[in-house]
Image (cartoon, rainbow, N blue to C red):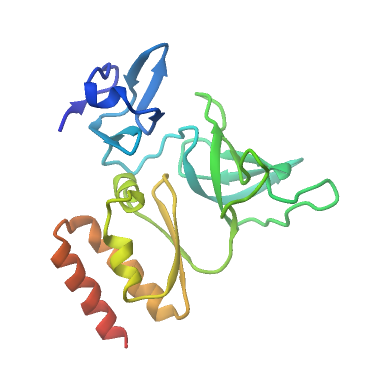
Amino acid sequence: MSIYLPGDVINEPSSSDSSIIGYGINLRGDKRLVTQPGALRSEEGKVWLSVHSKRYIPQEGDRVIGIVTSKTGDFFRLDIGTAEYAMINFTNFEGATKRNRPNLKTGDIIYATVFDSTPRTEAELTCVDDEKRARGMGQLNGGYMFKVSLNHCRRLISPSCKILLTLGNFFKFEITVGMNGRIWINASTTDDIIKIHDILVKSELVTDEDELIAMVQNNYTRSV
């Protein structure tokens, strides 16, 4: 495992084949410059830095969970956990037109992608892809949102992570994980939502798979 500090240049051969640049790294010409301190990770054509932090810095392509704070003209302002509010145009929702605008209110939660994160400006978000399809993005209704570390969110969405797979063997639930350290969950009962929340928070400190399974099974047994 290699540790990098801001300003370092990544020259490791293991990162040269990665076509997607993730959190903590910026491209400057043909150089990969580190912007956040952390451990270098690479998986399935992507390279990023694993950072133990709760302060999120927007990166283009990140999926994030935002909270609507206000509306200004054609834009909604959202809290995504950064120093500045993000914004999203009403046209960046699937099916949106001048006559059919999304009916978002203060406090509503949306799942979106960062498509412009120019430094010292408000990050701009979108809830549609290049084909103008939502693909799971948009308003999240009901459920419960909570915060964890940025590193834990990245762990949860990794294909090699067993936490969500193990939970799915015991609970029926919906989950959305934002790269900005926020998680939204929904289940058929409030009790299940509480159990799943507790497991996800505690799992950040669990690395042994057998221990994880035992923890999930114990919580499931107490809820039935």
**Residue displayed at 26% across by 17% down:** 8
Residue at figure coordinates x 32%, y 69% from the top left: 167
157 lies left or right of 108: left
Q: Quadrant of the N terminus?
A: top left
Q: Position of residue 19 (x, y in %)?
A: 39, 27
Expressed as whole percent of the image width and height from the top left, the position of residue 129 reads: 61, 42
Could you tell whether 7 is left or right of 80 in the image? Answer: left
Horizontal side of 110 relative to 208 (left or right) equals right
Query: Residue most toward the bottom?
Result: 224
Quarter of the figure with residue 150? top left
Residue that sits furthest to the top in the current view: 29
In this rendered view, identify the residue nearer to me: 84 or 114: 114
Q: Is residue 212 above or below residue 31?
A: below
Establish if 132 lies above or below 172: above
Q: Which of 25/150 is in front?
A: 25
Residue sitting at x 49%, y 32% = 60
Residue farthest to the right?
99
Look at the picture and state if 134 lies above or below 120.
Answer: below
| Residue 18 picture quarter | top left
Residue 212 percent location from the top left of the image: 19, 66
From the image, which quarter does the C terminus lie in? bottom left
Residue 191 in the image: above or below residue 155? below
In this picture, residue 156 sits left or right of residue 116: left
Q: Position of residue 113 (x, y in %)?
A: 54, 42
Q: Which quadrant of the figure has residue 104?
A: bottom right
Q: How many marks?
A: 0
